[in-house]
Amino acid sequence: MLAAVKLPFGKTIFQFQNGHSITSDSANLIDFVLKNTPRKKLRILELGSGNGIVSIMLSHYRPNWKIIGIDIQAKLVELSLKNAQITNAKTEFSEADLRHFQSEKFDIIVSNPPYFKKDEGRISPLEIRALARHEILCNMNDVLFSIERNLKNSGTAFLLYPENRLFELEKITKKIDLKITQKKVLSNAIIVSIKK
């Protein structure tokens, strides 16, 4: 079953009622990306694009960006393609595993990956929700290695994680020669920008 979500620019997209709900964290991530990137033509990759809200909104505010969203869940890719169609967003979505994805390099990579470790808290019995919230199919290492592999040397990645995972994030980025260049603390999360 689908639930409608009204976007700030008047269009409506849909999310699965039993899936991961859109939160203000997504809006904060989008805002942070827009404020910290140039308006020029860029190639953007969204890792774990879910229902497509981040890519679709970025496409609305930066129509000259070429945006590709990938997700491992076919059901979500299908929904994000429908959402792009009804909002007239010029975004591409495809089913792919970020652990193995490799393409031409990107100027910007954006991700709101699963917040919780596999052994943290109660995992939802609903697969679509469990995969979005817990590191079942990919973990922080996987996300950062995908960034390292797919980001241009001059590019920037933007990630959203719970604030209590910042130390772990800093430790892994140093280990693979990435560096956190900016942080924005939200009420229960943190947005970081990362460069090579």
Image (tube, helix red, strand yellow):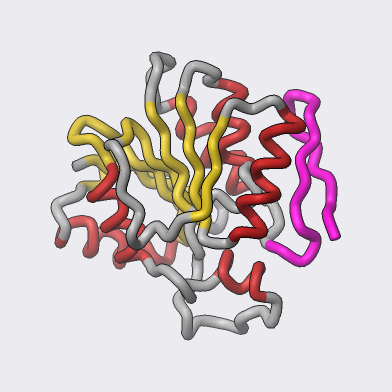
Please tell me whether residue 2 belongs to the stretch shown in magenta.
Answer: yes
Residue 68 at x, y percent in the picture = 48, 38
Q: Residue at x 61, y 73 (%)?
A: 130
Which of the 4 image quarters holds residue 104? top left
Give whichever of 171, 64 is nearer the camera: 64
Task: Reply above or below: 17 against 53.
Answer: below
Give whichever of 174, 85 is nearer the camera: 85
As drawn, is 189 to the left or to the right of 19? left
Q: Residue at x 55, y 58 (%)?
A: 188
Q: Residue at x 19, y 42 (%)?
A: 196
Where are the magenta residues, as a range?
1-19
As drawn, is 157 to the left or to the right of 19? left
Please tell me whether residue 132 belongs to the stretch shown in magenta.
Answer: no
Residue 71 at x, y percent in the picture = 52, 55
Give whichever of 139, 33 is nearer the camera: 139
As drawn, is 184 to the left or to the right of 194? right
Residue 48 at x, y percent in the picture = 50, 54
Task: Reply above or below: 100 against 49.
Answer: below
State the count of labels. 0
Residue 42 at x, y percent in the picture = 38, 23
Q: Residue at x 62, y 44 (%)?
A: 52
Task: Reply above or below: 187 against 182.
Answer: below
As drawn, is 28 to the left or to the right of 143? right
Task: Reply above or below: 10 against 80.
Answer: above
Give whichever of 121, 184 is nearer the camera: 121
